[in-house]
Image: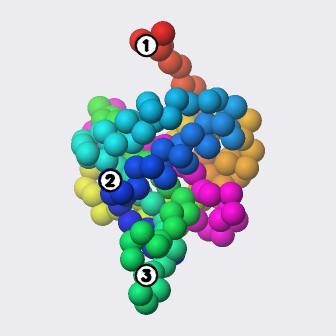
Amino acid sequence: MTIRPAAPRDTTIIADYNIRLAWETERLALPPATIQAGVAALLEDHTKGLYFVAETDAEPGMTAADLEVLGQLMITYEWSDWRNGMIWWIQSVYVRESARGQGIFKALFRHVEDLARAETGVCALRLYMEQDNATARRAYENLGMHQTHYQVFEYDLRG
């Protein structure tokens, strides 16, 4: 398996995985055109964030089109004036069902952790999850993450 930054050629599979993620975790049906446009916008503008994908290793004679994306993870940024540092938010975590239990998320997480440690000024990695997702909770805790005392609130400006 190889971890790499996502490229525009990954837009369709990332959008598909995001749609699957929303359905599996929240039974939320996301509009494909909106998701496709949102993924494309981030891939075109890294100030919005970064996607990383885990894909099968290449074998002799294979092209990029032959490789399969097994999982994904997105990073967005939040400045913390309290810590005088950047918090990287882990979002859009998805591992293809047939690849689960093989360490895909752990590899993606460790890759991002290594990048964050190499950046001077990144002070924390954070994520939020659907509160009843016990499988995700165990995975995050097994990586050394802990639940904070914060709760997330939202005010939707679009409706």
**Residue 82 occupies quadrant:** top left
**In the image, which is nearer the foreground, mark 1 or mark 3?**
3
Instruction: Reply above or below: 115 against 146.
Output: below
Instruction: Look at the image and give the residue range highlighted in magenta.
Output: 82-104
Mark 1 or mark 3: which comes first in sequence? 3
Q: Is residue 60 left or right of residue 104?
A: left
Q: Residue 10: give x, y in percent of width and height.
A: 40, 55
Q: Name the residue under label 1.
A: 158
Is 144 in the magenta? Answer: no
Towards the viewer: 8 or 21? 8
**Spatial CA span between label 1 and label 2:** 27 Å
Report if residue 116 is visible in the image: no
Mark 1 or mark 2: which comes first in sequence? 2
**Spatial CA span between label 3 and label 2:** 19 Å
Which amino acid, by three-letter code, is at mark 2?
Pro
**Spatial CA span between label 1 and label 3:** 44 Å
Q: Residue 65: give x, y in percent of width and height.
A: 42, 69
Q: Mark 2 points at which residue?
A: 8
**In the image, which is nearer the foreground, mark 1 or mark 2?**
2
Q: What residue do we see at 57% from left, 40% from top? A: 19
Towards the viewer: 4 or 19? 19
Category of crowding for the residue at label 1, using alpha-carbon neighbours closer than 10 angstroms: few (below 14), some (14–19), many (at least 20): few
- Do the numbered discs 1 and 3 sit on residues whose CB atoms are within 8 Å? no
**Residue 21 occupies quadrant:** top right
Which amino acid, by three-letter code, is at mark 1?
Arg
Label 1 sits on a secondary structure element that is loop
Q: Residue 132: give x, y in percent of width and height.
A: 74, 35
Which amino acid, by three-letter code, is at mark 3?
Met
Category of crowding for the residue at label 2, using alpha-carbon neighbours closer than 10 angstroms: few (below 14), some (14–19), many (at least 20): few
Category of crowding for the residue at label 3, using alpha-carbon neighbours closer than 10 angstroms: few (below 14), some (14–19), many (at least 20): few
Label 3 sits on a secondary structure element that is loop
Label 2 sits on a secondary structure element that is helix
